[in-house]
Image: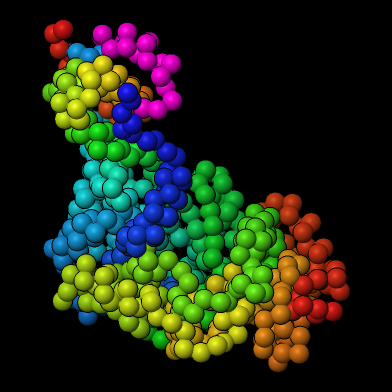
Amino acid sequence: MSIPMAVTQSYNDFSSNLHDRMQAERVPASVTIEISRRCPLKCVHCYNNLPMGDVDAKRGELTYSEHCRILDELAEAGCLWILYTGGEIFARKDFLDIYTYAKKKGFLITLFTNGTLITPQIADYLVEWRPFSIEITLYGRSRETYERLTGIPGSYDRCLRGIHLLVDRRLPLKLKSVAISVNKREVADMKKFADELGVSFKFDAMMSPRIDCSQSPLKVRLQPWEIVKMDLEDEQRVGEWRSFAARYNGPMEEAGQSDELYQCGGGVAGFAIDPEGRMSICVLSHVEWYDLRRGNFREGWDHFLRHVRGKKITRITKCTTCKIKPMCGMCPANGELENGDPEAPVDFLCHVAHLRAYALELPIPSHGDCQYCPEGAEYKALMTSMDSLQKHGAEQWMDFSDSNQLLPILNKRQKAAGGCSSCGL
Amino acid sequence: MPGVGAEMSDQHIEAVGISAIRFARKGEFATRTITGEVVIVPVRGRIGDLDAIYHFNDVGAFIWNLFDGKTSVHDIAQAVREEFDVTLEDSERDTLEFVVALESAGIIVPSIAMDS
């Protein structure tokens, strides 16, 4: 007789299998914990940052002992993955104390940082207490662009120092960026830099309003055609969108049938805790929260978040029956931030989703009264975006590969099948 | 463990030498129980990237706790036999395979050789 006792799996297999089981049992698998909203940078696009010297922000942050108590409760509930983010995590002098406590509890920890506050001492400490992953956001490849975005002279050199401190110690570093109007032409160079360092790179072009309701980040958000242009210039990204669409874009009779407001993993396996200890369904959603200073995690998870996650839609919108929703990224948090209403469609996201589908020649089954479909009020704007995409198609922003060969699909617009049943462009 | 029966004879021979060895965990690990399985998570020490992860059933978790640098493989097998009501042959074979797997992965290391 043999006694099966150990299973070794690749991390990805382990993670996928465990997430499936945890989601099925509604075990709180992963949490995003915002350590502080304070940050030494003043990035123009940020949804969240406050000055380092913001006394009220600092005073409101959970204490070390409160963090430890919450970590105890999370471990007890079965949580395994923690993402620590900010603001800037190292804005708190005692962050490594909190981190070490979490490490000792056996969490798999990812750190998001801008890297500018990383010292040799911090890097050495992380070698000893190794995180699962560290992601540094690089805002530009040139000093001029980086500091135009961050608003802080000297920050570029400090970021690069942080990156090299981690690379030199072979820590599990990944680089990433945002793509906004300020740095869009340097994304390719940032990718090249990451390649030279031997670390992975990704970028995100979808900006949100600030959680304090300011719309300021939207001023530097790329135009829809610019976002799709960046998709098209990245062969891997194109492949991922096509694959994603093949898996999830509706058939007509199935898509949009759920009456649940939240379609994501929030409140089922994931959740967020802000610097003041308020637990919510995700980092972007702050309309409803549970105060972990006044109650314990188990109560918040079992009752408050279960209630939030179980909310139903109250009305039919174009999102309800949309067949290209996976191309979009619309979620209740986006609705809250842009429109003050979790169910209100975000016009910008709708524009990008339709443009992306057209550009990739993906079918767009008819989905009711949609402004971006033929006969819709915004259809002309969509076609203007297609023209911009075509006009600027030859400009190489990204140069990720020889993927510019993908751009000629834009020259076949009249054959762009799909498009709201029969767009007949 | 399933699917490795053909290797047992060689390992059993090897066990004559290994069974007297004590093993200790390399670095510091936390033990988490998630949806009924025991997962070991690296905490401290210059261990490599987490490209593979180990999770155990209750037998594996029982043995894992005995990699304390004090308990020999032979004694672990005895403890497994008593705890889980299996034959000594089974417990020795499976304990040894467990030891070999974890030592190969570099997460346990021989501690102090005992008098055989």
Q: Is residue A21 left or right of residue B68?
A: right
Give the main secondary structure of the magenta stretch.
helix
Give percent across and percent down for residue A267.
36, 69
Q: Where is residue B43 in the image (x, y as percent from the top left)?
A: 25, 43
How has the structure been colored for display? rainbow
Can see residue A30? Answer: no
Q: Does the magenta stretch include residue B8?
A: yes
Can you say whether B116 is above or below A304 in the image? above
How many marks overall?
Answer: 0
| Residue depicted at x 38% and y 43% | A171
Q: Which residue is drawn at 59% across and 51% down?
A: A192
Q: Which of B73 and A402 is in front in this view?
A: B73
Relative to A400, residue A334 above or below: below
- Rendering coords of residue A346 (x, y %): 55, 83
Residue B95 is inside the magenta segment: no
Image quarter in which the C terminus of chain B is found? top left
- Which region shows up in magenta? B1-17
Which one is nearer the viewer's eye here, A108 or A14? A14
Say above or below: A279 vs A193. Answer: below
> Is residue A35 at all visible to an observer of this figure?
yes
Residue A254 relative to residue A65: left or right? right
Indicate whether B48 appears above or below A280: above
Q: Position of residue A401 (x, y in %)?
A: 70, 51
Residue closer to the observer: A63 or A316 = A316
Quadrant occupied by the N terminus of chain B: top left
**Residue drawn at (13%, 23%) of the image:** B70
Q: Residue furthest bottom?
A: A377
User: Residue at coordinates 32% horizontally, 8% vertically from top-left?
Assistant: B13
